[in-house]
Image (tube, rainbow, N blue to C red):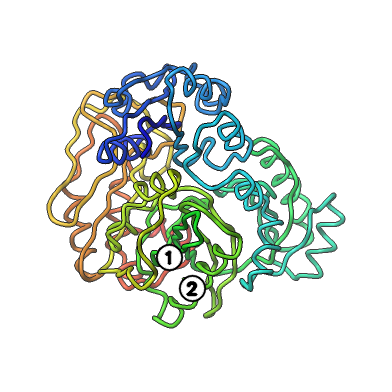
Amino acid sequence: MFEKVLIANRGEVALRIHRACREMGIKTVAVHSEADANAMHVRLADEAVCIGPARPGDSYLNKSAIISAATITGVDAIHPGYGFLSEDADFAEMVEEHGIAFIGPKSEQIRMMGDKLKAREFAKECGLPVIEGSDVLNNVDEARTKANEIGYPVIIKAKAGGGGKGMKIAYNDQEIGTAYMMAKAEAKASFPSDDVYMEKYLQNPRHIEVQILADSYGNVVHLGERDCSIQRQNQKIIEETPSPALNEAQRKEICELARSAAAKIGYISAGTMEFLFEDGKFYFLEMNTRLQVEHPITEAVSGVDIVREQLRIADGAKLGYSQEDIKLHGCAIECRINAEDPETFVPNAGKVTEWHAPGGLGVRVDSEIYSGYKIPPFYDSMIAKLIVHGRTRNGVLMRMNRALEEFVIDGIKTTIPLHQKIMAQPEYIDGIYDIHWLENNIRNFK
């Protein structure tokens, strides 16, 4: 097994990776920006290296600085977490060229799935259902012509996109020009390419994803599906497993389709196949070639430590179990806690004056926040994840209400009150929601 791993990330995921490494007897190296010098994973790591100023481009996205830190500290492997460089094929290739293991898939797999149009073609070849769409659109006229062929509404998407960025909807010819230009501008600002393409826009879908684990010996398993439909501006707010929208036949169908597709491309490591689900039909959305923020709910129902498996697979180990060995138990829900005003969603960085995480049976909190910690304003506003597990969905909802009530974060505003309101809505309690439900109903929450 690896002796030393560099964690090329920050926040709760960096601490999550550190914990998995320590439980396996692996030493860790934390790289950090000047703003994160007092972060918990930096304090706990065996070694720490400052790689630059607060701005991500000067630190967590600085590939040369991270490779230099890895070389100086003599690590065996680099874990990229999620976000930042986790799906940057060039970075993965740099790591490989330096003789360091990249804890994730091969760079060519990241590159293939990172190109959304290539991913669509791959999906078709593997028998996955895809939404009607276009190739790269070169101008507004092309976009307007294709939109009329497909039929409105349509969505313009960044070819190299992800995380909800570079996506704009058009409902008619008057809106298509603006949608095209805005998507292209956002893609240019956020990704290596400003190329955009078009898909038919589904009006009321669920967002369903399937967790995959695959080793380098051709063994591939799925760990069930997650429902990530509680979203705001294409950003996930709450996730749960299993999805209350699927019956057992649908669940078996989509999970096996995802597992089979990953096997066909020879995928290695943890990955997630994402789908939209509407009117009883699935449509391939994309594949995330990394660890997902919501992985803890899958760990809760499967008993599989996904980060530990990533480390083992990257070190050349076999999975050690087949699909028949995977048994999923109960239900789990994750609430993402952001340092934001719960009504306006304006980020609210600052000093945490008091911190008390909920506990008890079936309750897990992933966070590196502590009393006295100053949340920097330079990064994503998610500061904690509250994960609750139980035998039944109703039991989990009751447990989540109790845990949210017990959660104390003073000194800053957080989205805990929003989660409490969501948990009280009849539609959410009944599992009747889609990706637009939150934005369409949030003004009526009491």
* Mark linked to residue 222: 1
* Mark linked to residue 256: 2
Q: Is residue 301 visible?
A: yes
- Where is residue 282? Give x, y as percent: 55, 73
- The correct choice, above or below, for 409 with respect to 217 in the image is above
Relative horizontal placement of residue 340, taking residue 214 as reference (left or right): left
Q: Are marks 1 and 2 in contact (CB under 8 Å)?
A: yes
- The correct choice, above or below, for 31 with respect to 441 in the image is above
- Where is residue 159? Give x, y as percent: 70, 50
User: Residue placed at 59% from the left, 58% from the top?
Assistant: 286
User: Residue placed at 44% from the left, 47% from the top?
Assistant: 316
Label 1 element class: strand
Extreme bottom residue here? 249
User: Residue placed at 47% from the left, 65% from the top?
Assistant: 208
How far apart, in angstroms, are the residues tagged by discs 1 and 2?
8 Å
Extreme left residue here? 360
- Where is residue 241? Give x, y as percent: 35, 65
- The correct choice, above or below, for 364 with respect to 36 in the image is below
The numbered mark, 1 or 2, whose residue comes first in the sequence reads 1
Q: Amino acid at mark 2?
A: Glu
